[in-house]
Amino acid sequence: MTGLAMKLRNMPLFLLAVYMPLLAQTSVNQNNPHDTTKRDPGAVRTAATQKAPVDAGVPSLAAGDWPTYNGDLSGRRYSPLTKINTTNVKQLELAWTFRVNETSGGGRRISSTPLEVDGVLYFTVPSHVWAVDARTGVKLWQFDWKSKGGEAIGNRGVAVRGNTVYFETEDDYLVAIDRSTGQEKWHAEIGEAEANRAKFNFGSVPPTIIKNHVMVGVSGDDFDVPGFIEAHDPETGALQWRWYTHPNPGEPEAKSWPNDEAMLHGGGMTWVPGTYDPELNLYYFGTGNAQPVINGEARPGDNLYTGTICALNPDTGKLVWYFQPNPHDTHDWDAVQTPVLIDGVINGQKRKLLAQASRNGWFFVLDRTNGKALVSTPFAHQSWTLGLNSKGQPIPNPEKMPKPNGSLVSPNQSGAANWHPPSYDPQTGLFYVAASDAYSVYYVFDNNKKPEGWAGNDRGGYSRFALRALDYKTGKLRWEHPWIAGSARSGMLTTAGGLLFTGDTVSSFVAFNAATGAILWHAGLGNPVTNGPTTFVLDGQQYVTAAAGDTLYAFVLR
């Protein structure tokens, strides 16, 4: 037996799954929800000494780092790096792996996008944060939060500002950690943490840093409570403002609900971090499904601001405009998918645009200065609409509402897209999304006048997954790569090297030619890719990372 064969024989299975493809080279105040009064949340512990901030401004990808969830605040997940490109990507090799082990919160899926700043990666699973040397994968420090309970469905990452790392805990706290030592500086409640837990709300959203605001959202288990966005002081954690995802009683939009009681318990969780335009000073984000889930008979109307793309002034927490991709949701579809900011041309005119591939199967391009729809078109199979209204919103078909004896509808409950981040490449002009053509039979099983929580459910059926590249100007399909089997729900990354990185349905990390859709390289990881890939450059070498299950992988050209 050769030395190489002996090494392969003794190699752990998860590493063997990586090396074999590489060797083959194939590869707030509830009664006053918009109250912006500053207040002390009562759970803030002031930091001791703090180092001078490295950079408290708007993060940039220009230095070769990956400093925010989406790389920058546009949501494009596009890197200007070119060292890895279409001609040499086949030479990618494994640099290192880091496994979240059982003694460190392990066995947990890494949904987090690792941030890379100054040669260090920061990433999470629920209740735990790591700092890892980006060159070697060696742990520098680990922070463990003692949770008081809450849903640990996943945690999608951190934010970095100066010498501080911020993350949300599943029991609804915002925690600030010293970036050098891994020691806590302070923690502050998100909402009213204990009350949130009683309502099955939890924290999983990466914070977003905008000027002197740490923006946080809230996740929830659909038990008839409202979602919200908060801004906190980055130095102390003090609450600056909170905005609930419903109108104030008496406002015109409140008429989209049958009554105030239904409206104030109507859902709209804020599961995914938003994006930001510094010129307009607007923060964009999507909101979750309406509640009670599935059964909409108890809440007739459009149910604002659930299933809605919102634009807030981050300094005041005031709503500037909104567009609702999913009026009167009855299928558990949200509109939290990343609102991607594009500076482009529509009908020969330069426009500030916002694009979203929504969970309900529709692709929207909005004028991000005012929220007016410029493009509304399906990007996946959908059967639930009667067309579009004058605002470019889909019109729900009453015959496709859930029924006691079932109603066959497309998309299915998981949606034509989900939380996994898309990407936009300004070189190709293409918007890339993990898409699903699927059906569910939707049932109503709670016919009370005031149903609560899950008042219905679905039974899944046929599904087909594909990577789709859409022309942002029209939403038309430019190319697609169908997946043979399984569920492909990985995030996307595009680069100026002409590449698109994502995961497939059979546990491989794949590099495509972003312009043509041709596969150029792949590596088997043993589990499906569970986060959004990233890239950065250190010592003249460009790295690419992806997580699969409980392991983070880094690749580099050798």
Image (cartoon, helix red, strand yellow):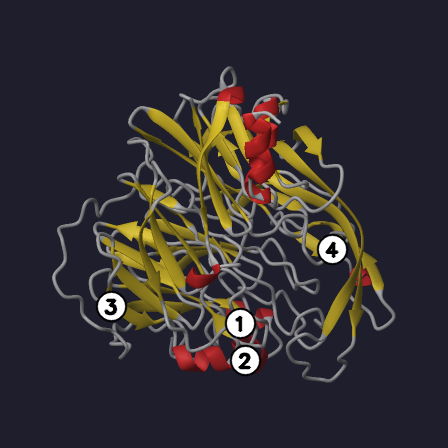
- Residue at (28, 77) in percent of width and height: 43
Q: Assess whether mark 2 and mark 4 are in contact (beta carbons under 8 angstroms).
A: no
Are the residues tagged 2 and 1 within 8 Å (C-beta)? yes
User: Residue 186 bears which disc, if any?
Assistant: 3
Who comes first in sequence, dot 3 or dot 1?
Answer: 3
Which residue in the protein does label 2 denote?
260
Q: Which mark is residue 254?
A: 1
Instruction: Tell which residue pokes out farthest to the top in this image.
Output: 87
Q: Position of residue 260 (x, y in %)?
A: 54, 80
Front tag of 1 and 4: 4
The residue under the point 14% across, 58% down is: 50
Say which residue appears at 32% left-offset and 63% top-offset. Answer: 231
**Foreground mark, 3 or 2?**
3
Residue 454 on image: x %, y %: 68, 74
Comes first in the chain, label 3 or label 2: 3
Q: Could you give the CA–CA distance between mark 3 and mark 2, rounded to whole angstroms?
A: 37 Å
Tell me the CA gap for discs 4 and 3: 42 Å
- Check if mark 4's residue and mark 3's residue have beta carbons within 8 Å: no
Instruction: Tell me if label 1 and label 4 are in contact, CB under 8 Å.
Output: no
Q: Is residue 273 above or below residue 39?
A: above
Q: Position of residue 375 (x, y in %)?
A: 60, 39
Q: Residues within 10 Å of mark 3 (few under 14, many from 20)?
A: many
Q: Amino acid at mark 4?
A: Asn
Residue at the spot of label 4? 412
Is 293 left or right of 28, judged from the image as shown? right
Work out whether residue 388 or residue 499 is closer to the camera in this orientation and state it.
499
Which corner quadrant holds the N terminus? Answer: top right
